[in-house]
Image: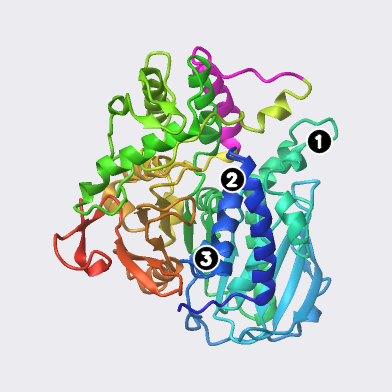
Amino acid sequence: MRERLSDEQALTTARVVYFRLIKLLRYTRGYMARPIAYLILTATLAAEICMARPGPQNLWQLPVAAPAPALAQTHAVRPCEALLNSPIGSGVVREAVTIPGSNGAGPWCRVTIEIHEKSDHPISVWLALPIENWNGRFLGLGGAGWVPGLPFSILLGSSLGFATAATNAGREYDANISPEALSRLVDDDTFLRDAKGHLDWDKLRNFAYRGVHDMTVAGKAVTAEFYGVKARYSYFSGCSTGGREGQAEVQRYPDDYDGVMSGSPVINWAHLGAAQSWPAAVTSATREVPQCKLDAAHRAAVAACDADDGLKDGLVSQVGSCHFDPRTLIGLHTDCGTIDAQDAEVIRQLWDGPRRSDGSSLWNGTDRAALLHASTPAPSLDRFENEGRSLEKPSLARFESQFNKFVNRYGPTMDTSDPDVRAFAAHGGKIILWHGVADDVVPAAGTVRYVQSIRETLGTSATEKFLRFYEAPGVLHCQGGDGPQPVDLLEPLMMWVEHGQAPTAARSENWDASGHTSRTRPLCPYPTHARYNGEGDANDARSFSCVN
């Protein structure tokens, strides 16, 4: 069974949050609430019941074992408590406490930095610094949903020897937040409101990009002071909102990190938020389609496209590769009635995605490999601009203008889709992106679209010198689903940055109830995908090849 390296306190906190979030998932469908729920729920629940997952550290694709030191200097040169009240740029160290080791990990220094810069809202940064066995690297970890950083995550990185940081990006919660309180932040965007109930753009900018940058600058400075030498390498890892945070670093602050790992990233945040109203616009002109009919359409599409990769295993291997026609569903009996022509037309429009008034594609729809969902509420940020008034209901006639209005308003702050990342590549920076093909929270087509735009802007050859993108068949949002799960992607990123060994096929695995590996599959670099060779064990990665 794969060894879990997480601290007992981290796991205890995560377990409580997970079980609380089970109830939340039963009642919420909106995008703003679900990413963190999927992230935290899938990892710790599985760890708790010994299902097919490693520990929560896999959310950030951390290595299984502590990597070899990148520097000769591996221990602190000053007491942890001596950091207290140290000025750090425009910030100050408010806490510096030695924490005893547990679960095989040594003692560490817990640091809280408070930063006041370009904002009236102080940004808190949490650091976990191993007192012994530092591996010479700085690691920033991202958050999820409306939570910029998860405080317990720093313990996972420090147990592997990283100087590890997370931040609240100016949101008012601290490192000692209870699991119950943390879970209540999942879908709570009220922290972005000013005294009059309107959107506070300063807080939004902190959340979007400024908080993680300030965390990185301050975290590196304290790390250098504690060990007497700068970190040799720096990495950032996150999924969902954390993945978006990583790409914001690449695009806005290209010198912050040597390597960035972004899973299921919300790269096109504003586009995704605007497109969330598409199902409501479609059904407003027709009728709602019950969820069981949508589920039946999804199952039929997957069954029809299953064998396209040479093996019938319930997985669709590539985003956009399945073109199942929903009209073939007409007459299909389900638990909520028979699918008729109008149902099929609604399903087609949900799969095809938002359209302009001239019929051309405005944005991505739901991939046939992912679950379809009934209409969801309008994006929550619209409430700040309509406080005390009724929201304008989505409609097909007005959808293009509504979409453009939302994207133009929030895209410059929230989107991280700039394909010109030459500045990051110029100093040797490397990126690994990955996305579950079956992701029904943040559709993978947006990440495919972004990768394609980089290749078109910089050229395929130049792009492959610093970026790898992996599509994970059958994987949901950040984790979960029937497909083999990506594992330890930070490891090949480190090998690429530190030794120039460009990654090829990565690892993905399933595990049985005992925690033993039950299936392996190569995770192929885009634009290739895994295809069964026609013979050999279908649960063995060696029976597959990466093909175009």
3 or 2: tag closer to the N-terminus: 2
2 or 1: tag closer to the N-terminus: 2
Q: CA distance from mark 3 to mark 1?
A: 34 Å
Density class for disc 1 (Cα within 10 Å; few <14, some 14-19, many ≥20) is some
Q: Is residue 134 above or below residue 441?
A: below
- SS category of the residue bearing label 3: strand
Q: Position of residue 329 (x, y in %)?
A: 32, 28
Residue at x 80% of width, y 80% of height? 82
- Which image quadrant is residue 503 in? bottom left
- Magenta residues, start to end: 389-413
Q: Is residue 390 magenta?
A: yes
Q: Which residue is mark 2?
A: 34
Q: CA distance from mark 2 to mark 1?
A: 25 Å
Residue at x 72% of width, y 29% of height? 384
Residue type at the position of mark 1? Asp
Q: Which of 164 and 334 lies nearest the eye of the viewer? A: 334
- SS category of the residue bearing label 2: helix
3 or 1: tag closer to the N-terminus: 1
